[in-house]
Amino acid sequence: MTPPRRLGPSSANTRSVVLDMVRSGGTVTRTDLAEASGLTPTSITRIVKSLLDDGLVIETGFSESTGGKRSSLLELNTSGRFAVGLSLDAGRLTYVVTDLGGSVIGRLVSPGIEEEGPGVDVVRIAKELGQLLVQLDVPLESVVGVGVAGAGLDLGAGAERLSLTATEWESFALNEALEPRIGLPVVRDNDAACAALGKYWAGRIPATQDFATLYMSSGFGLGLMVGGSIARGASSNVGEIGHSIIDIDGPECWCGARGCLEILAAPRAIVAAALADERLTRRLGLSSDEHKFRADFDAIARAAAQGDERCCELITDSARHLAAAVLSIVNLLDLDRIVLAGPGFAEAGAIYAREIRAFVGRYARTRVIHPVIVELADPGLDAAALGAATLALQSALTPHAAPAQIGAWESLSG
Amino acid sequence: MATDGNSIGLVVRTGEDGDALVDAVMRAIAVPLLAADLRFVTRAVPDLEAELRTYRLWGRVGGVAGVIVIGATDGDERLRVLTQIDMPFAALTRVAENVSYPAVTIDATAASRALVTFLETQGARRRLYVTSQSSPEPFPELIDGIDAPVEVVVTYDVRSESLHRAELASKADPIVMVLDEDEDAVALLDALYERGIPVPDAVSLICWSDSLLCQSARLPITAIDRHGREIGALLGAAALAAIHGVDFGAVLAPQPIVVARETT
């Protein structure tokens, strides 16, 4: 049995923790909450009243009698608030709107950020977001915030450095540009971390289970969930697995090092290898247009999934490099679950999963102690957007578990 | 009337949006729409009433140029409402429906026929169970011709029931099991592995809908590819035809095939 989580009654995060207990518990009573939190019944009654007043929790009936007065059953009021998640990607923008329970009520897919600059894209995003909420009949005031998932480094102070595929976004302060246009708080994290958080929240994975999400879009990222929270590091930039050095004498990477995973195995590298083969280029109708490399990669991955021998070789080579990087992570952190997510796995994810599973199963130091589960997130294309919505929900509902950079948000208690 | 919108809309019933085929279709629809510089908006709703309310809302607030209707039938209330609000539409329908709009049609018997044909090519004549939350039409009629004892099990607890029957059967003759959902098939495969029941020697496993989960399972699972990607691409093209008033007719979706993998 899980021991009660002792909380100080004056803790600023007490309400947040109690609300999270209601969320993860499904249906609970005040007595359950008192036992789980270690708070007095009086404190719980006061906190639950404030949650009921704010429409975050509802009473759904009564527990069975055990001889005394029957207890009220409490649940999260899932339709009381909504959150938006946005995945910024070169190929497409994906917006997801969820209710408080994390269930998706609507989506929007629109063209990616590949061609326009951030100044133009932010205006478009604000317009699309407003239109989406109208089309889903979701009042703006019921939205707790917008989570944004994107590749690249967090530079702090609202600025970020997105991946090499969108250099114009370097140092662009997305939060500051978007918030005034949409009238909602914006929180951003990298796509891998968002995908991990989405898996944790929607998949109801217990906080005691640590796992990593490996995200492939134009490059690679790793989101690490430890104790129910995203591991953040010194500057909120944990997970730059794309720049793990796989071959010290390998080709020079744009980051300055040699033989990085990204330069050897990311979609751009696979497309470059395919384009060197004229016959394959013709057969697949590859465009060789720099702005369309993701479409070219999808064509190669699709052909590999359908058994095309040359494409299988290319994807398998990429998967073997990725497997080597994953093995290092598994050995370093003693993980027993790796989730593969992101649009890069949408076509040939099975090949990647198979190679990584085989490699880790064969060489992980802990293989005699426990297996390592390697699974594909489904659907891969929405994982980051769903996680970004979760980030917004978590920031508003359970700021005790949210990263420091968004802890400054005011909770719904105001 | 909202033909000046920049989006194509689709309403999906809650519960169906987790179905592997529906997910594949919805993912693929976006591709031709994005290529035409359009957006793709989807809304999950619990029932028909909510679906109709959504269409009326879209007609009122604008932004949606046309919609894609899933599972349209003759006399469908949804098509009547869409016509009433002057909203262009395309639809996914069964072959038998009387279609006068851009449509992609599915032969409802094709997946069952593909499965029966596949089973007949299997050398061993094994007992076949189908565990499903609802009996997959018209499978029961088609399996009459199979030269093997067959049982269709309808249960709400697919995982427990299928595992129980697999354990019983593994002590006697080998069996083939067909499961509707990819997640159930993967869960059964894992459970059989943990109990030391060999797949496919004791239990062959087939999933009704192919997906990445089937393909990436511990043993890649034999599954019926119902061509969700191709259907989605066709539906996207049908929607474009609908909003531009271009003749599209009714296009038959590609026939499902059984993709044999390591569980059979």
Image (spheres, coloured by chain):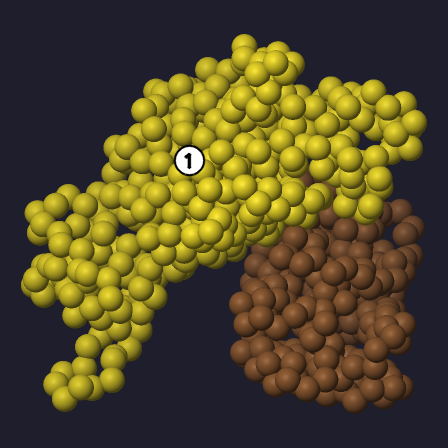
Is residue B25 visible in the rendered image? The answer is yes
Where, quadrant-wise, is the N terminus of chain A in this rendering? Answer: bottom left
Residue depicted at x 18% and y 82%: A70
Q: Nearer the viewer, residue B230 or B217?
A: B217
Q: Position of residue A226 (x, y in %)?
A: 35, 43
Q: Position of residue A300 (x, y in %)?
A: 78, 35
Compared to residue B93, the image places residue B58 above or below, namely above
Name the element at disc 1. Answer: helix
Q: Is residue A125 left or right of residue B239?
A: left
Residue depicted at x 84% and y 78%: B124
Q: Which residue is mark 1?
A: A332
Compared to residue A293, the image places residue A344 above or below, namely below
Furthest-front residue in this view: A368
Compared to residue A220, the image places residue A73 above or below, namely below
Residue depicted at x 32% and y 46%: A227
Give the colour in which the image draws chain B.
brown
Q: Position of residue B80 (x, y in %)?
A: 74, 67
Q: Is residue B68 left or right of residue A122?
A: right
| Local crowd size for mark 1, using a 10 Å CA cut-off: few (<14), some (14–19), many (≥20) | few
Q: Amino acid at mark 1?
A: Leu
Give the colour in which the image draws chain A.
yellow
Where, quadrant-wise, is the C terminus of chain A in this rendering? Answer: top left
**Which chain does the residue under circle 1 lie in?**
A
Q: Is residue B42 left or right of residue B3?
A: left
Q: Position of residue B203 (x, y in %)?
A: 69, 74
